Image (tube, helix red, strand yellow):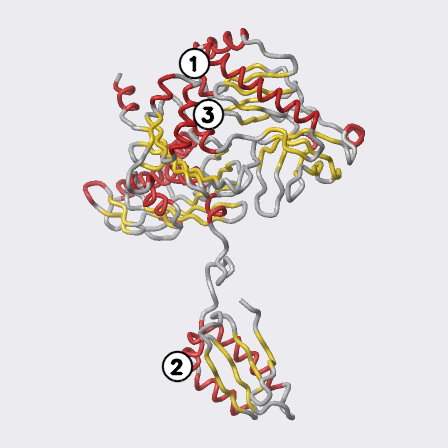
Amino acid sequence: MFEFIKKRAIVREIIVNVESLETRVAVLESGKLEEYKIEHPSEERIVGSIFKGTIQNLEHDLQAAFVDVGLERNAFLHYWDMLPDDQVQLEIEDGRRRRTPRRKRFSNDEIEKRFSPGSEIVVQVTKGAIGTKGPRVTASLSIPGRFLVMVPGSQLKGVSRRIDNDKERARLKKMLARLPVPEGAGLIVRTAAGGGRKSSFVRDLRALLVSWEDMQSAIRESSAPACVYREPDLVERVIRDWLTEDVDRITIDSRENFERIREVAGRISRSSRSRIHFYDGDRPIFEHYDIETQIEEAFRRTVKLSSGGCVVFDEAEALIAVDVNTGRHKGPKGAKATNHGKGNRSGKGSRALGSGSQEQAILEVNTEAVEEVARQLRLRNIGGLVVIDLIDMKSRKHQHTVFRTMKTALRRDRARTNVLPISELGLLEMTRQRVEESILSTMHIDCPYCRGRGIVKSPLGMSVEIQREISAIMRGRRDGGAKELQIVVHPMVLDRLRREDERVLVDLQDQFVGRLAFKSDPSKHVEFFAILDGGTEEVLYSSSDH
């Protein structure tokens, strides 16, 4: 009873902000931001969509085909994804497919016979275009509903493994066996179906059959490349995928979409419809629920922990590096572990705590850190290889505790994850499925000033580079040519030249016959400089434009 009360003490809300150029969804648990999604109506969402495409070419070295589905870049289709295989064991979790390694392999000759370039194929996008890579697709199709997932071309019937209650699984399997599933299609019971009634399943199956029939008509009538099935928008997917029994309330600030999702929720149950609310307050809805502040804090490079520690995120294209530090962690009875960084590995320790207290403090920070990392991966929608540099722990027991905490925190992630035990170097390594661009990549571009590096050359570095080019030009003009060189630089660089490098420049001028004149231009980039002939104003050297 106590556990039940404790669980329900968490108020779970979904806040939806709909604007003309952007739709945002935030999931709050007792006011804390736990999940965050963004969609732009002007940009086509392709993950989950089904296309009738044309095979452009087969690449045996890559064991993959490239398929024209009408998008900017051809889709990538691996050979083992080209034919649905009923012998392949599928594990469906919330509409996503996982396969065991046991699957039939096809030779290159077999692939060429079945799928010659120019032939048509129906595929579904499993991963959107990321960076320079095109979307990834599969010929194993699935159409998700509220409680069920239809799998065309399969005879599979099953229940999501996330439903782990044996009695409930048995009940759902019996219910599934009684459903009138058409030939040539499999059916999977989704996690959200737990506790659902047969009437809800029948209603959901009817809707799936309509979608399937429409898709079949589009496949017959459309010329490749063409989209034959499209996933609903974010607002409707919130109801389909997120409105579970543990959600207390959904609040939306768009009257038009409020009516629409109430209608969609009404098809599920009367109680679901009653949980949809319209927000018409004076303040923007995300400000009213204090979400904007949380978003700003969550997406910083350094995220502070309530214990006083912090985690630092560095995102590359396919690698996320996370550094964990104790910062000003408060130990037992208010004692502080003062910024000991990486503990034994860095040779720093906390003088304020005894060894036992210090180990406990490290455990507390690492445990909170991995929970926050799991949350941040969901919020930022980042993935690939994730390496977490934890604070060193001597105790194997503590290492196992942190590892189990991470595995538990990742259970709520909708993306596929795989985490390894903590290594001897104190690193926790994991992978997270990348389906779409991260939210940071979607909302930001590389800084046009530093070109995404996050740094620019220092005035000292610029001074060295300028002197090097002046020397090269004057060396080549010893026997004649320009007697005066005019150097155009950024004011910050000129300040360095005047204050600290004046003597070096005077010596340089004395060494080579000629005169040096400097001019600042605040409109120029700090890394820009140009050297001109003082007489003709001919440009003798110009650094790359910024």
Residue under label 2, please give it.
Answer: 499
Quarter of the image where one finds residue 392: top left
Furthest-left residue in this view: 333
Above or below: residue 136 compared with residue 148 = below
How packed is label 1: few (under 14 Cα within 10 Å), some, or many (20 or more)? some
Q: Residue furthest front?
A: 256
Q: Nearer the viewer, residue 492 or 26?
A: 26
* Foreground pick, 302 / 237: 237
**Residue 244 position within the rendered picture, expressed as x and y whole percent measured from the top left:** 40, 23
* Amino acid beneath label 3: Arg
In the picture of the structure, the residue carrying the numbered disc 3 is 240
Q: From the viewer's perspective, is residue 78 above or below residue 543? A: above
Percent position of residue 381, x then y: 47, 40
Residue at the spot 43% in from the left edge and 18% down from the top edge: 268
Q: In this view of the protein, which residue sits in the foreground, 542 or 256?
A: 256
Q: What is the CA distance from the residue labelled 2 to the residue labelled 3?
A: 66 Å
Of residues 289 and 158, the one drawn nearer to the viewer in this rendering: 289
> Residue 196 got which mark?
1
Residue 330 picture location, percent across and down = 24, 44
Residue 397 seen in render: no
Q: Secondary structure at mark 2?
A: helix
Tag 2 and tag 3, C-beta contact below 8 Å: no
N-terminal-most mark, 3 or 1: 1
Q: In the rendered view, does 47 fall on the left or right side of 273? A: right
The circle on residue 109 is none
Amino acid at circle 2: Arg
